[in-house]
Amino acid sequence: MGTMLVQRVESLSLSGIESIPKEYVRPKEELTNIGNIFEEEKKEGPEVPTIDLKEINSSDELVRRKCREKLKKAAEEWGVMHLVNHGISHDLINRLKKVGETFFGLSVDEKEKYANDQSCGKIQGYGSKLANNASGQLEWEDYFFHLIFPEDKRDLSIWPKTPHDYTEVTSEYAKQLRGLASKIMEVLSLELGLEGGRLEKEVGGMEELLLQMKINYYPICPQPELALGVEAHTDVSSLTFLLHNMVPGLQLFYEGKWVTAKCVPDSILMHIGDTIEILSNGKYKSILHRGLVNKEKVRISWAVFCEPPKEKIILKPLPQLVTQNQPARFPPRTFAQHIHHKLFRNEEEEDTK
Ligand SMILES: [Fe+2]
């Protein structure tokens, strides 16, 4: 069988169409709250917290405790935050963005050589969303998806060969980000009254926690008020780390309203995902979020999902966090079962529409 022909959003965008195909148009109820992202970004109101990690290991106990408490509070109230002074050099981050931009700067035909094939389970590579329900709903983005850590689980044969330093730069970023993930999970564990290494262990540790990178490429959209780059969802990961090219797009559903994340220079945006929400018995939040597109600038983001192994671990609230007053809020499920449950639940919602 030949490879199925998949519509690339970049090709649609470059074709000069003035209205978008109906598959990209959101349902009526959603259209009432999709605005112009540049206007949305200027709005005043609640803001995603910014956490300065400079003091996270301070030898002064009081200083250290204050920094860690801020992180805890952000994880409890928002489940998403901008991290600054995160310890990953700006030079490395700039190089990471450069290699991703260079790859996406190739023609669609060149990128097609890296196309994934979701129909046969080849999920790594260059891709676009395939409609997974009767409505045929699609998202306004193309992406490149690949596992970047642990190193022995990577498939370097599918990584971009252009630019030539793609692998070197991305590998270094993966290694450093893995260190940051450990540090964050340590603080999140201690703040729950657990041993420092507990969350790390629960999600698989150095050997089993998988870092999956998705470079999201959101082309210019002629009717941005009708489409979404990514539809509303919560991340299934333990933690997600996100960089972008300083074009706004991310919105968080906070206290009943969509709040636009401002672009914070030199920051890494971090989400608490469902996995840590479950383990913490809901103390830490996995927030609903989505991505808007625009008609002026291409947006690119680099998401790294830190995911537990699919089958090996049963995710459930940690016994220390379950009491008579705070019963377990989530049933035990493997990571694979959790993903299935979310898909299935969405399908049920579709059926009742
Ligand atoms: Fe997400």
Image: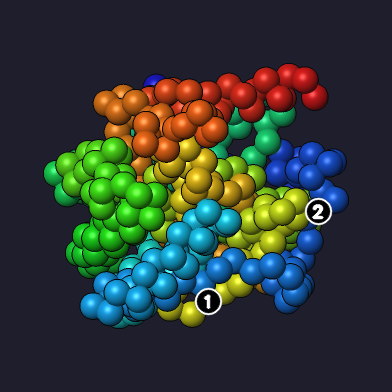
Q: Secondary structure at mark 1?
A: loop
Task: Name which of mark 1 and mark 2 comes first in the sequence.
Answer: 2
Picture residue at 35% right of the left edge, 78% below the top: 63
Q: Quadrant of residue 172?
A: bottom left
**Which residue is at the front of the view, 90 or 197?**
197
Describe residue 292's horizontal placement relative to residue 223 as left or right.
left
Mark 2 nearby-residue class (10 Å; few <14, some 14–19, many ≥20): few
Residue topped by disc 1: 264
Q: Can residue 92 be seen by looking at this rendering?
A: no
Quarter of the rendering containing residue 238:
top left
Query: Measured along the vertical axis of the image, is residue 71 above or below residue 130?
Result: below
Q: Residue furthest front?
A: 324
The kind of residue on which mark 1 rests is Val
Q: Amino acid at mark 2?
A: Asn
Front-most of residues 75 and 66? 66
Which residue of the protein is positioned furthest toward the left in this rendering? Answer: 152
- 308 is higher (above) or lower (below) than 196: above
Quarter placement of the C terminus? top right
Instruction: Look at mark 2 in the image and give the residue it sits on.
Output: 33
Q: Nearer the viewer, residue 218 or 244?
A: 244
For this view, does 300 lie left or right of residue 40?
left
The residue at the point 42 percent across, 23 percent down is 332
Q: Residue at x 38, y 55 (%)?
A: 191
